[in-house]
Image (cartoon, rainbow, N blue to C red):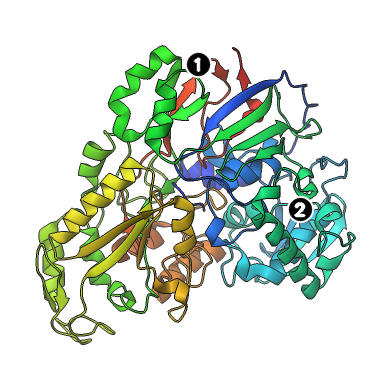
Amino acid sequence: MSKPRALGASATIVCGALLAVSASFAPPAAASSTGATVTFAELPGATPNYIFPMMTGAYYSVANIEQFERLSYRSLYWVGDNGKPVIDPALSLAYPPTFSAGDTVVTVRLRDYRWSDGTQVSSRDVAFWLNLLEANKKEFAAYIPGEFPDNLKGYKLLGPESLQLDLTGPVNPTWFTYDQLSQITPLPQQAWDKISVSSPIGNYDETRSGAVKVFDFLTSQSKDISTYSTNPLWQVVDGPWKLDEYLSDGYVKFVANQDYSGPDNHSVKYFVEEPFTTDTAELNVLRSGHSLDYGYLPPQDAPVKSTLEPEGYTTSVWNSWGINYFVINFNNAEVGPVFSQAYFRQAMQSLVDQPAFIKKILNGYGHTDYGPVPSQPTTYATNYELKGPWPYDPAKAVSLLREHGWDVKAGGVSTCARPGSGRGECGPGVKRGAAANFDLVYASGSVVTEEEMAAIKSEFSMAGINLNLSAEPFDAVISKAAPCKPSQAACSWQMANWGGGWTFGVNPYPTGDQLFATGSGSNFSNYSNPSADKLIEATVHGKASLAQYENYLAYEVPVIWMPMAPYAISEIYNKLHGVLPQSPIESVTPEFWSLSR
C-alpha cells in the first residue's frame, strides 16, 4: 500500500521476470563515506511516524514504508529495477524462490547479509517474522483472510540460509512472490525477541502467547517516536542506513550503515528528510536558493518551473505504479446503505470530470484513471484508461438517481422519495427521506487536493449530492479511513481522501486481494462483493488474467476513481547524481547517490 499516491512495465516483464532474475550476485564491500549530506523534501503533512516493519492500516503509507522503514530494514525481495515495478535481485535479501509440488511448496534461500551487530541475517529471522505475523495477523495492514499466513500450512528451517514454506493449496507463483514474499521482512530475533525493555532475549515468539507479547512490546516502542534515535532496538539494522536523528515534526536524519552487506557506493554519509506542512512552503524553500537537494514542484505551480533552473534544479516527473481514488465507507451506519447501491456510486463517478482536472488543476501532468489496475504505461488489461465505463456525464448521474427513486434537487440535497428494493426504488436499507448529504475529510497541505475537492463538491452538487468538506493532516486522515464495523465509534467517518490512492509497492502484482477483497486489512472502504471476491481469487490461486477483475471493478465503482497525478514533479539539484530513474514504488536509495558541491 501504500498510502499515499500510488509505474509501469509491460505485462511480459512483470509476469515473466520473477523466475528469470539472475541468482548470481556477490555484493561489493561498502565504500567509505565522504561526509556528504543530501536533503530530501517530504510531501506536505506526510511525515514518517512508525518504524516497526509490521504496521496497522493507520500507519500504512509510502512515508513510513518506502521512504523510512526500508532504508534500514529490507524485505526478502526488493521491487523496483531501473524504473520498472519488477524485482531487483541485486537488492533482494533472498535468491529467487523455487516452487514445487504443484506450486504448494516454496523454498527460499537467503543471500549473505549481516545485521549491523555482526549477526547473520538468517532463516530464524524470517521465522521470527512469520511467528509474529501468525499470532497478530489481524493487526497487520496487509493481512487478507485466507491468504498469508492463513495459506501457510507450516514451515521448515533447512539451515541458517534457507527455509521451506508448505502451503495449503496451489498459488500463482508470480502473485505469491510479488505480493506475499515481498512483504516478509526478516527481523533481528537476537535483538528484538523481548517482551519488555528489561527482559532478556528469548524465544518468546515460538509460542502464540509469547508472540503476542513481543508484538505488543515492539508496537509500543514504535509508537514512542521521541526515542527513535536513541532506542537500541532500532539501531540493529540490515539496510544501508541507520536512524541518527528524529524529531516529532517529521525531520529525519539517517547515517550510512558502514556494515551494510549489500551493494552501495555510500559517497553520501547523511540522508536528511525535511518535513513541510504545505507544498507552498516547500516551493518557497526551493525558490529561495539551494538548501534542498531533492525537492518537488507542486503541480499547480508548474508554470514557474523555469524560475528554478537558475537555482541549479532539473525537473524530472516521478511517475508511480498505482491508482488514484478516494474512499467511501460502506459500513457507516448512517450512509453505508446509500453507498452500498451500485447505481449511486456510478452516479457519483459520472460527476468526476477527470480530463478537466488534469488540464486545469494538474497543469497537464497525469492521466485518467477509471479502474483498479494501473493504466499507464499500458500493462495487463487496462481497458478503461481513456474514459472508463462511467465517464463525466452529469445528465447520466441525474438520470441514474431519478430512475432509482430519488428526488433530485440540483444545487440542493437530493432525497430518497421511493424506498424499497424493487424496480425504480432506492434500494435495500435506504430509508424514505435519506439525504445525499455526506461528510468528506481530506488531507490538508496540498493545493491540488484542495482544488480537486472544491471541484468535486461543485460537480456533485449538479445532482444534489452535497459534500461537507473538512481538512486534516494526512496522518489523521489515514488513521480515520480504516476498516471498521458499523457498531464501532471509529466507523463514523463517511468519505475520506488522503490525496493519492494506492501505490502497488509491497504488492506490485495489481490484483485486488489487498484493496477490495472482503475483510482485507487495506480494504479501507469496507467493500464486500462475492462476485469481486471470486474474480480476485482466480488471479491469486490460478493464472487467470486480470482483465475480468479489472472490468468488473471499474464498472462496480467500489471507490471514487480520480485522475492519477505523478507522485511528484521532482526538482533535483544538478550536482546530485544517481537519482534517476526514480522508483516506481516511490522508494529512495540514497546509498547509490553522490553529491558534488
Task: Relative to 149, say whether 349 is above or below.
Answer: above
For label 2, the SS is loop
Decide: marks 2, 1 in contact (CB < 8 A)?
no
- What's the mark number on residue 417? none
Could you say where residue 401 lies in the image, as x and y percent from the top left?
15, 71
Name the residue that disc number 1 marks. Answer: 574
In this orientation, which residue lies closer to the viewer: 499 or 27? Answer: 499
Could you say where residue 149 lies in the image, as x and y percent from the top left?
67, 67
Three-letter amino acid code at the position of disc 1:
Asn
Task: Relative to 150, say whether 467 is above or below.
Answer: above
For label 1, the SS is loop
The residue drawn where x is 82% and y is 73% is 207
The residue drawn where x is 65% and y is 51% is 225
Q: CA distance from mark 2 to mark 1?
A: 37 Å
Three-letter amino acid code at the position of disc 2:
Leu
Task: Relative to 129, say whether 25 is above or below.
Answer: above
Could you say where residue 430 lies in the image, as x and y percent from the top left?
25, 82
Counting residues from the start of the chain, the first of labels 2 and 1 encountered is: 2
Could you say where residue 432 lies in the image, as x and y percent from the top left?
18, 85
